[in-house]
Image (cartoon, rainbow, N blue to C red):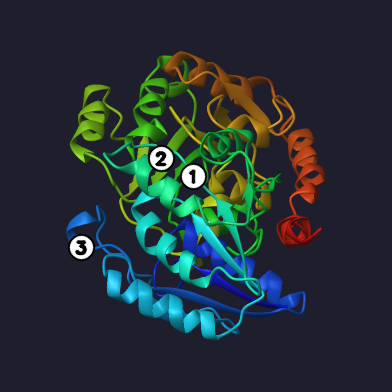
Amino acid sequence: MKIAILGTAYPYRGGIATFNERLAKELIAEGHELSIHTFKLQYPNFLFPGKTQFSFDKKPQNINIERRINSVNPINWITTGLSLRKENYDVVIIPFWLPFMGASLGTISRILKSEKTQLLCIAHNIIPHELRLGDKMLTRYFIKRIDGFLAMTQKVLDDLNVFNKCSPKVLTPHPIYDNFGEIEPREKAIETLKLNQDYRYILFFGLIRDYKGLDLLLEAFSTNEIREKNIKLIIAGEYYSNQAHYKKLIEKYNLEQDIIQVEQFIPDSEVHLYFNACDLIVQPYKSATQSGVTQIAYHFNKPMIVTNVGGLKEMCPDGKVGYVVSPHADEIKKAILKFFNETNINEMIENINQIKELYSWSIFTKKLLALTIKRTT
């Protein structure tokens, strides 16, 4: 089958780019002819909250990636759509994660749509965490011409059904991120990161936005019950929201000595260090759909604490691979203490090893491509 993925990929960085590249590798391994068509311009600089949109890692090997799409140039959308249409793809997979992309990807989709080419959407988010004027209009414009949808949580599937009740849809979980390196001894990662072997480590990982609840974790971490233990918090990620708010909390609770801050986007090649070094992953989100952090934690056999928002709880069986709590500092604190005081950690890691077998990329691609059969039968 001749397949294209339409969306972000190298030289751009980020979770969606990583997802697209890992999906491409799986489809190529299954024998499909595949290309990724990514952006010439993804976000205008004045709209991008981070330091850079671009990756410092090496280009993925054995994947054909072409930069073709300009997200803000309507003439480009038409010419890109017409040129892709001539390439006669059987399936075009379009990940959707942000309404801003609805105009460009929606226009290209309208031109591509034909009897020959089926359009499938992987819905990462339908209703964004941070709402803006025009989001619903742009999302509806994109969704209208898609032949089939894959959602990775019930929350996203429910959001999809608000916009489209008729097209085929499938629900299957986010696959394991197994492309960030190998599981290594904790001691080795701690040594590489120049951390103290005498401490246990909690990890908050990823881009820092207000909805991810870092403030809740800082409040939980400030309590005497936690501070009396040899536990440190690693915050590894670039701030996409007001950093001053979090710095004030750290100063307010005198947490400077208890926190290790890595204030940068963590390159894919270094992700393994932070996950191998830590004992526990905490995702204190205030709202969510799904999170790739959960699937990285699974790969590295790391227990986790997540809040019961969006689809996070679907991926974290409570008491088996971690704990699910309400998004409140006191509940997060109790779960952290329960983990370090009461939990059989080796048993929890064994549970993780068993459950993560359900989240293979081969299962994911089978469910995704089955949408093409639904359209033709």
Q: Position of residue 335 (x, y in %)?
A: 57, 21
At x 51%, y 15%, the residue is 331
Callout 2: SS: loop
Mark 2 vs 1: CB contact within 8 A: yes
Q: For marks 2 and 1, give the CA distance.
A: 6 Å
Q: Is residue 327 above or below residue 67?
A: above
Say which quarter of the image contains residue 46: bottom left
Q: Tell me if I can see residue 277 in this picture.
A: no
At x 47%, y 71%, the residue is 111
Q: Residue furthest front?
A: 115
- Residue type, label 2: Pro
Q: Position of residue 251 (x, y in %)?
A: 22, 28
- Residue type, label 1: Asn
Q: Quadrant of the C terminus?
A: bottom right
The residue at which mark 1 appears reads as 125
The residue at which mark 2 appears reads as 128
The residue at which mark 3 appears reads as 45
